[in-house]
Amino acid sequence: PTLPPAPPKAPDCLNSACELVPAIFETYKGAIVPRGNRPGVKRRVAATKPVLHVGRLSCGVMAQLRHKGVTTMGVDPWLFEGGRQMNDQCSQWYQQGQLSLKQMTALDAADGAYSLVVVTHVLERKPLAQLDRALTEIVRVAQKYVLVVISAFSNETDTSEYPADLPII
């Protein structure tokens, strides 16, 4: 017997937050993936509310979720940090308004615009004076779910993603 073809490979992602994508998908798939987009179903249905990722290297997380059929948007204020260039896919999403460089304290979205807001490794780097405003904005744009991932600085082994002069978002 012949084996079925291998599923398409997920896009590469250099962001440590991409390691969370399988767990995010499994935990929230009922809320973020319309029935027509589930694996094994050929008919595709547009998601009613996208997922928003806020964090560094958002394009990678967006690509991983989109590979699973999830409609996503991203906010990455550090996209051009250190002279970094956008890849073609990132550039296309930016030009289409699906990737924003906005600040987390002033998200450009309606109340409840996203089925899930995923915030990775940014809140712990925010001054307390701005934390309330950032959390208020995150909750405002989330329809139902918010997932916040923070780093434990004392045990964090890979801090190369976050230079000492990281801008406040």
Image: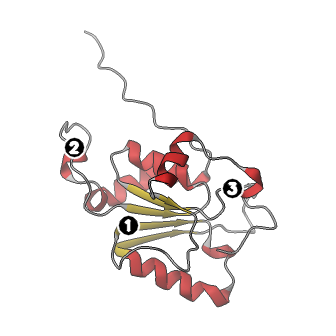
- Name the front one of labels 3 and 2: 3
Tell me the crowding category of disc 2: few under 14, some 14 to 19, or many 20 or more residues within 10 angstroms, Cα based: few
Residue type at tag 2: Arg
- In the picture, measured across the screen, residue 63 lies left or right of residue 78, that is left
Outermost residue to the front = 95
Q: Earlier in the sequence, mark 3 or mark 2?
A: 2
The residue wearing badge 1 is 116
Q: CA distance from mark 1 to mark 3?
A: 25 Å
Tell me the crowding category of disc 3: few under 14, some 14 to 19, or many 20 or more residues within 10 angstroms, Cα based: few
Q: CA distance from mark 2 to mark 1?
A: 20 Å
Residue shown at 58%/62% (left/top)?
Answer: 76
Query: Is residue 51 at least partly visible in the picture?
Result: yes
Residue type at tag 1: Leu
x, y (%) of residue 26? 35, 53
On residue 80, which mark appears?
Answer: 3
Q: Earlier in the sequence, mark 1 or mark 3?
A: 3
Tags 3 and 2 in contact by the CB under 8 Å rule? no
Residue shown at 31%/59% (left/top)?
Answer: 32
- In the picture, measured across the screen, residue 161 lies left or right of residue 132, that is right
The residue wearing badge 2 is 44
x, y (%) of residue 125? 69, 74
From the viewer's perspective, is residue 153 above or below residue 132? Answer: above
- Name the front one of labels 2 and 1: 2
Tags 1 and 3 in contact by the CB under 8 Å rule? no
x, y (%) of residue 77? 62, 65
